[in-house]
C-alpha cells in the first residue's frame, strides 16, 4: 500500500500534494540560502527537474557569484557571459539544501516509471511542471521573496536542454511581471 504522500499515476494522483511539498522544500532551501548569503544580490530563484521528471530541485544565483565566475574564467564574450548567467549548471547555488527535496524525488522517480510503463508520461510531465510553477507562484504570492522580488526572476527549468527554453519562457511569463518577463526573453541575445 502506498503512503498518501506518494504520487500515484492514476485518477487519484495527488499533484496538489506535490505542489505543497515543493512549496515546503523550496521554502526550506531558499530561506537557508537567503539567510546564509544575506549580502549577495540574487537575480534568480528556480525549481528545476530532468527529462524524466525524477527530480525537483532548487537553484539560485547572485550577481556576485556570476561576476566572480566569469572573471575567474576570463569570459568577456557576451554570448558566453549569457550562458554563465542563465545556465543553471553554472550557478553557485544549484541544489542548495537539496536534501529538503529527497522524499519528493524518491516519489517522483517511482511515479515517473509508472507513467512510462502506462504510456501516460507526457501528461505526467506536464502535471509535474505545473506543480513546480504553482509552488513558486504560491511562495511569491505570500511575499516570500520580500523586498528583493523586484530585482529577481523566478522560473522553472529542466536539465534537459530540449525542453528547458520553452519551459523557462512559459513559467517566467506566468511568474513574473510583463516587464521582467520581456527582459528575461532577451537573456541569450548578445
Image (cartoon, helix red, strand yellow):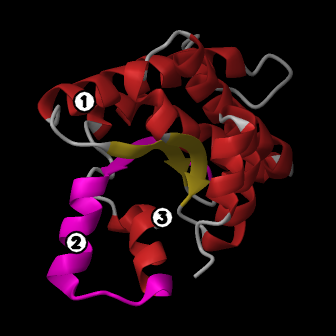
Q: CA distance from mark 2 to mark 1?
A: 20 Å
Say if mark 2 contacts mark 3, CB within 8 Å.
no
| Rendered residue at 18%/67% (across/down) | 68
| Residue at mark 2 | 69
Ranked by sequence position, the earlier of labels 2 and 1 is: 1
Indicate the position of residue 42 as horizontal and vertical percent values: 34, 43
Which structural element holds mark 1? helix
Range of residues picked out in magenta? 52-79
Which structural element holds mark 3? helix
The N terminus - image quarter: top right
Which structural element holds mark 2? helix
Label 2 crowd bin: few (<14), some (14–19), many (20+), radius 10 Å: some
169 above or below 44? below
Label 3 crowd bin: few (<14), some (14–19), many (20+), radius 10 Å: some
| Rendered residue at 41%/18% (across/down) | 146
Ranked by sequence position, the earlier of labels 2 and 3 is: 2
| Residue at mark 3 | 86
Q: CA distance from mark 2 to mark 3?
A: 13 Å
Q: How many marks?
A: 3
Residue 15 placement, left or right of 148: right
Say if mark 2 contacts mark 1, CB within 8 Å.
no
| Rendered residue at 47%/40% (across/down) | 152
Indicate the position of residue 163 as horizontal and vertical percent values: 71, 64
| Residue at mark 1 | 34
50 above or below 42? below
Residue 122 placement, left or right of 105: right
Amino acid at each position: 500500500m502506498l503512503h498518501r504522500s506518494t504520487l500515484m499515476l492514476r485518477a487519484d494522483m495527488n499533484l496538489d500534494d506535490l505542489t505543497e511539498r515543493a512549496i515546503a522544500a523550496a521554502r526550506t532551501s531558499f530561506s537557508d540560502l537567503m539567510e546564509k548569503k544575506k549580502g549577495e544580490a540574487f537575480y534568480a530563484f528556480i525549481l528545476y527537474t530532468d527529462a524524466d521528471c525524477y527530480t525537483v530541485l532548487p537553484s539560485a544565483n547572485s550577481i556576485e557569484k556570476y561576476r566572480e565566475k566569469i572573471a575567474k574564467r576570463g569570459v568577456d564574450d557576451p554570448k558566453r557571459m549569457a550562458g554563465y548567467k542563465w545556465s543553471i549548471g553554472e550557478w553557485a547555488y544549484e541544489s542548495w539544501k537539496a536534501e529538503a527535496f529527497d522524499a519528493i524525488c524518491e516519489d517522483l522517480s517511482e511515479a515517473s516509471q509508472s507513467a512510462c510503463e502506462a504510456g501516460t508520461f507526457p501528461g505526467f510531465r506536464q502535471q509535474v511542471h505545473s506543480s513546480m510553477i504553482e509552488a513558486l507562484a504560491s511562495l511569491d504570492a505570500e511575499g516570500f521573496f520580500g523586498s528583493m522580488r523586484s530585482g529577481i526572476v523566478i522560473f522553472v527549468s529542466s536539465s534537459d536542454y530540449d525542453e528547458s527554453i520553452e519551459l523557462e519562457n512559459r513559467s517566467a511569463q506566468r511568474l513574473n511581471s510583463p516587464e521582467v518577463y520581456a527582459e528575461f526573453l532577451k537573456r541569450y541575445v548578445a
